[in-house]
Image (cartoon, helix red, strand yellow):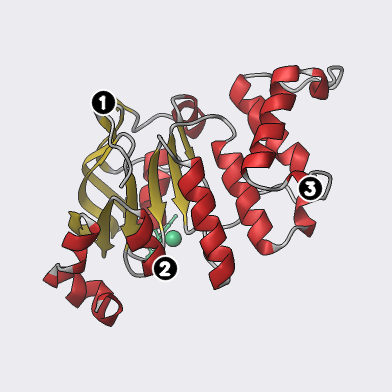
Amino acid sequence: MSQFLKGTAIELRGVEKTFGITSVIRNVDLKVAQGERHALIGPNGAGKSTLFNLISGYMKPSVGQILLRDETISGLPPYQINRRGLSRSFQVTNVFANMTVWENIRCAVLWATGQRYAFWKNIDNLPEVRERTAQILVDISLTARRDVPAGLLTYAEQRALEIGITIAGGADVILLDEPTAGMSHAETERAVALIRRLTEGRTLLIVEHDMSVVFGLADRISVLVYGQIIASGTPEEIRGNKKVKEAYLGEEAA
Ligand SMILES: Nc1ncnc2c1ncn2[C@@H]1O[C@H](COP(=O)(O)OP(=O)(O)O)[C@@H](O)[C@H]1O
Ligand SMILES: [Mg+2]
């Protein structure tokens, strides 16, 4: 169990999202405490990625309010939410395939320092950028692969790189969308150890389909079914929740 800090990191109040006449997110209330690792689970198409899009500003809620550390962020563009310390990964790998590992991380670090790219500046001469980039490569165990184009990394390495990109800016609220999707059991274990280490002292909201990962990593779990949160609680509470078993976990929890 990670140490909860004072205050609320993310809060959703009565959030709804409709596409045309289709209601995808329905009246969602959610609170994630600072320093908490919170897993969002639910069947395919439940609206998990949509919820991430709403929190990170890629979509605007049709109704309701989203707050980051008690300040309203719904309506802000993604980059402004990012500047306030919230960073997300995407379900689909989001690295620049032709850029090296080093360049991918450096790009994310540069963005976070507010440095604007200028072709006449040699960005590798900026010591703070170089040091931070090197540290992240150590953190994600990709130092030995620094000059490899990201497109040539193994799948698991690409996902680690993506987590590195997500945390590069020093955000203290991290959203990860299915970070272990498509990984082998051994790769998943390594990825979870990485996520655990890199989110120490930060707030994590994670969408994850692997229940052993969810129940091992999360302090609290919310279950989204058809756009509604049907239960929120500790792993024990969720495991024992009848509604959750019926709607989603089924035999998996047994
Ligand atoms: N931009 C969009 N326009 C219309 N429907 C969408 C859009 N994005 C997602 N949806 C629909 O919203 C529902 C939830 O999708 P999603 O959030 O991706 O679910 P999950 O991540 O839980 O699998 C799905 O039925 C999907 O087709
Ligand atoms: Mg999804």
Q: Mark 2 sits on what residue?
A: 210
**Which residue occupies the foreground of this view, 162 or 189?**
189
Q: How crowded is mark 3: few (under 14 residues within 10 Å), some or many (20 or more)?
A: few
Residue 87 visible in image: yes
Question: Looking at the image, which residue is at 39% across and 43% down?
Answer: 204
The image quarter in which residue 68 lies: top left
Q: Where is residue 215 in the image (x, y as percent from the top left)?
A: 32, 62
As drawn, 28 above or below 169 = below
Report if the CB atoms under discs 3 and 2 are less than 8 Å apart.
Answer: no
Mark pair 1, 2: CA separation: 31 Å
The answer to which of marks 3 and 1 sits earlier in the sequence is 1
Q: Which mark is residue 212?
A: none
Q: What residue type is labelled 2?
A: Asp
Say which label, 3 or 2, has the lower sequence index: 3
Percent x, y of residue 30: 23, 45
Q: Name the residue under label 1.
A: 70
Q: Mark 3 points at which residue?
A: 144
Whether residue 185 is situated above or below residue 216 in the rendered picture: below
Query: Could you tell me which residue is drawn at 61 percent across and 55 percent down?
Result: 159
- Distance from label 3 to label 2 (Cα)? 29 Å
- Check disc 1 and give the amino acid type: Asp
Mark 3: amino acid:
Ala
Helix, strand or loop status at disc 1: loop
Image position, residue 156 (x, y; %): 64, 61
Determine whether label 3 and label 1 are within 8 Å by CB.
no
- Whichever of labels 1 and 2 marks the residue nearer the N terminus, that label is 1
Q: In front: 71, or 236? A: 236
Q: In this view, does 109 lie to the left or right of 2?
A: right
